[in-house]
Amino acid sequence: MNHFTYKDGRLHAEGVPLAEIAARVGTPFYCYSTATLVRHYGVFADALRAAGLDATICFALKANSNVAVVRTLARLGAGADVVSEGEMRLALAAGVPAGRIVFSGVGKTRRELEFAVAQGIMQINVESEPELLALSEIAARRGVRMPIALRVNPDVDAGTHAKITTGRKENKFGIEWTRAHEVFRLARALPGIEVMAVACHIGSQLTEVAPFRAAFHRIRDLVAILRADGFDIRRLDLGGGLGVPYEDDEAPPSPAEYADAIATTLGDLGCRIVLEPGRLLVGNAGILVSQVIYVKEGATRTFVVVDAAMNDLMRPALYEAHHDIQPVTEPPAEAPVAPVDVVGPVCETGDTFARQRPLPPLAAGDLVVFRTAGAYGASMASTYNSRPLVPEVLVDGGRFAVVRARPTYEDMLALENLPDWLS
Ligand code: LLP
């Protein structure tokens, strides 16, 4: 469910025609819908509540680190899952209280750990023994015991794209399942550490509930072992990963099914549940709007060349990901469709959004949108080919605002520096 629909033949974001935003902002741009964010958060929170779970929803900022988007979610009660000092600062700037921030990641630097301890965030999810030792030293020096979870790697196959699966033993993430107890014991002996939670995250864009269940069963077994050894495990951080439909025929598990999997495997342990959803909250709440520059007839196919490129939305180039493409002007019901390749201007063949995609006729100047681009779209964008970072727009009912401006070429050049021997 989202709020990007045709009204009077024109695609709108809630009450605003996208063509109107394009005329003001220029293309390409990302556009987010407040009503969709609110709805997604509400459906997820309600499902957890209905399953009887005492849960804290920490939005994974890596999916979308726009401050206005994060603030919209924070106002609904969301905390934040962050993986860098930058994301931590962003979450704080967006109004997320430090007491609702979880810090994850396999390579936190000492500087980042210092910052997290100084801010007094809710929890650090530690992923290795060296990280544990570094954190203990930093916290002890400040005279505090930092609340931590140990992220364990449950060695389950999430059945998702190889580049975004994280819960297998050959992945770099977490502490190997079979060594978890030993590392918990080490943590208990350290002066700057308060061990209170177990964390796991097995992958992203999961389309089945079974791998979650398998991982949660393993967590349950581990909690029993730890409690028998005197550990006071009060929280379980189950990560993110619930998938969203990118195509009409996809039906990932519903929030209710996911909540049921948690409740039936872990619900009786008396633990506060922490979740780190990213894509689920923002994926369908965002689109990328672009303009057709040329329609080019190639030797064997037609290329629709648009002004967005792989640097603006990397997912197709990186994961062969599918994003639905729609014209902003609604095609007539009887419009013919023909297969075309939709490509960007960047100088490599990887800069292809869709191959042989059946689309209605498009012409230079037409606006098109890439759907389900609210997660891992803008947050993964780069300036490859010296293209300015794509701006972001937030719509709320009948109003909209540019919530991240397109940098000017002067802004971009200002960061460059010629050494004196070249000037
Ligand atoms: N927690 C941790 C520790 C994570 O590593 C991730 C995602 C999440 C939560 C949020 O997962 P989500 O609910 O969004 O699935 N760039 C890729 C996705 C990378 C996911 C990385 N970790 C893509 O565009 O599909």
Image (cartoon, rainbow, N blue to C red):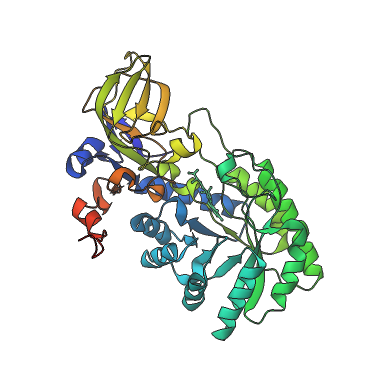
In this picture, is 406 found above or below 198? above
Number of marks drawn: 0
Where is residue 339, by image quadrant? top left
Residue 206 in sight from this viewpoint = no
Q: Position of residue 303 (x, y in %)?
A: 33, 22
Q: Position of residue 318 (x, y in %)?
A: 47, 39
Q: Is residue 408 left or right of residue 90?
A: left
Front residue of 313 and 415: 415
Residue in the picture at 54% in, 85% down: 142
Q: Residue furthest front?
A: 421
Q: Position of residue 353 (x, y in %)?
A: 40, 31
Residue in the picture at 42% in, 61% down: 74
Residue in the picture at 55% in, 33% down: 251
Quarter the N terminus occupies: top left
Q: Is residue 337 left or right of residue 182?
A: left
In this picture, is 279 found above or below 178? above
Q: Position of residue 43 (x, y in %)?
A: 50, 47
Residue 225 in sight from this viewpoint = yes
Front residue of 386 and 35: 386
In this picture, is 173 found above or below 194? above
Quarter the C terminus occupies: bottom left
